[in-house]
Image: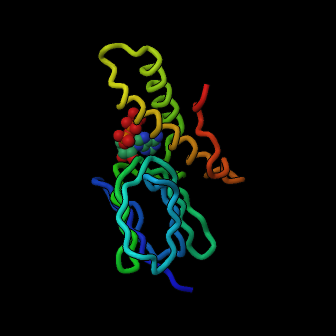
C-alpha cells in the first residue's frame, strides 16, 4: 500500500516524522483528508484535530494553527503548537478555558477579545483531543466543542 511522509514541526520540536497512510487536518476552509500522491497544496490550518492513520492505527493530535504543505508525496505541517492526545494536560487546558471564558464574560477594557477567543478555542480543542486517548475515542468528528454554546 502506498504511503507518504508526514512531518509535523513547531518552533520548539519535531512532533511527528514518519510514513503514514492518511492525514486529516483542520484546513481554514474545512477538514482536509490527504492520501498518498495528493496534488501539491498549501493552506492555513485553524485550531483543531489532526488524525493520522498508519497501518490501521490512528493517532490524534491537537494543533493550534499553522500551515500545511503537500509537495512530492510529503505533508509538512508547521504548527504554532501541537500535542499528541496523550501529552495534553487536561487540567491545564480546563484552566485555560476558564480563564478565557472569564475574560470574555467580563469584557473589561484591557481584555483583548480576539486573544481571549483564540485562547478559548485552543483550550476547547485540547480538551476534545485529550478525550480521544480514552477508550472509545472521544466525541465524533463535528461534535460541539466543550464549553461551546450557551
Ligand atoms: P496556557 O494558557 O495553558 O499556556 P496556551 O493556549 O496559551 O495555554 P500555547 O501558547 O498554545 O498555550 O502553547 C504554549 C506551549 O505549551 C506549547 O508548547 C504547547 O504545546 C504547550 N501546551 C499548552 N497547553 C497545553 C496543555 N494543556 N497540555 C500540554 N501542553 C500544552
Q: Position of residue 109 (x, y in %)?
A: 31, 14
| Residue at the front extreme, as displayed | 29
> In the picture shown, does residue 67 fall above or below 96?
below
Residue 27, quarter of the rendered image: bottom left
Q: Residue at x 50, y 62 (%)?
A: 32
The spot of residue 24 in percent (x, y) is 52, 62
Q: Quadrant of the N terminus?
A: bottom right
At 37% from the left and 49% from the top, the residue drawn is 81
The structure residue drawn at horizontal position 72% and vertical position 53%, both measured from the top left corner, is 136
Q: Residue at x 52, y 57 (%)?
A: 31
Which picture quadrant has residue 57? bottom right
Q: Is residue 110 above or below residue 130?
A: above
The residue closer to the viewer here, 59 or 106, is 106
- Image quadrant for the C terminus? top right
Q: Where on the picture, by quarter, is residue 104?
A: top left
The answer to whether residue 111 is above or below residue 70 is: above
Residue 58 image point, x, y percent: 59, 65
Percent x, y of residue 44: 37, 55
User: Ligand 1 quadrant?
Assistant: top left
Amino acid at each position: 500500500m502506498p504511503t507518504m511522509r508526514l512531518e509535523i514541526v513547531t518552533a520548539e520540536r519535531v512532533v511527528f516524522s514518519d510514513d503514514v497512510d492518511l492525514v486529516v487536518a483542520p484546513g481554514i476552509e474545512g477538514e482536509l483528508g490527504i492520501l498518498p500522491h495528493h496534488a501539491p497544496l498549501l493552506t492555513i490550518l485553524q485550531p483543531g484535530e489532526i488524525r493520522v492513520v498508519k497501518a490501521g492505527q490512528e493517532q490524534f493530535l491537537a494543533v493550534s494553527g499553522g500551515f500545511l504543505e503537500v509537495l512530492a508525496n510529503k505533508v509538512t505541517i508547521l504548527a504554532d503548537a501541537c500535542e499528541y492526545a496523550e501529552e495534553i494536560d487536561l487540567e491545564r487546558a480546563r484552566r485555560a478555558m476558564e480563564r478565557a471564558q472569564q475574560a470574555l464574560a467580563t469584557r473589561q477594557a484591557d481584555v483583548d477579545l480576539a486573544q481571549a477567543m483564540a485562547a478559548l478555542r485552543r483550550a476547547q480543542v485540547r480538551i476534545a483531543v485529550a478525550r480521544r486517548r480514552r477508550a472509545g475515542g472521544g466525541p465524533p468528528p463535528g461534535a460541539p466543542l466543550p464549553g461551546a454554546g450557551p
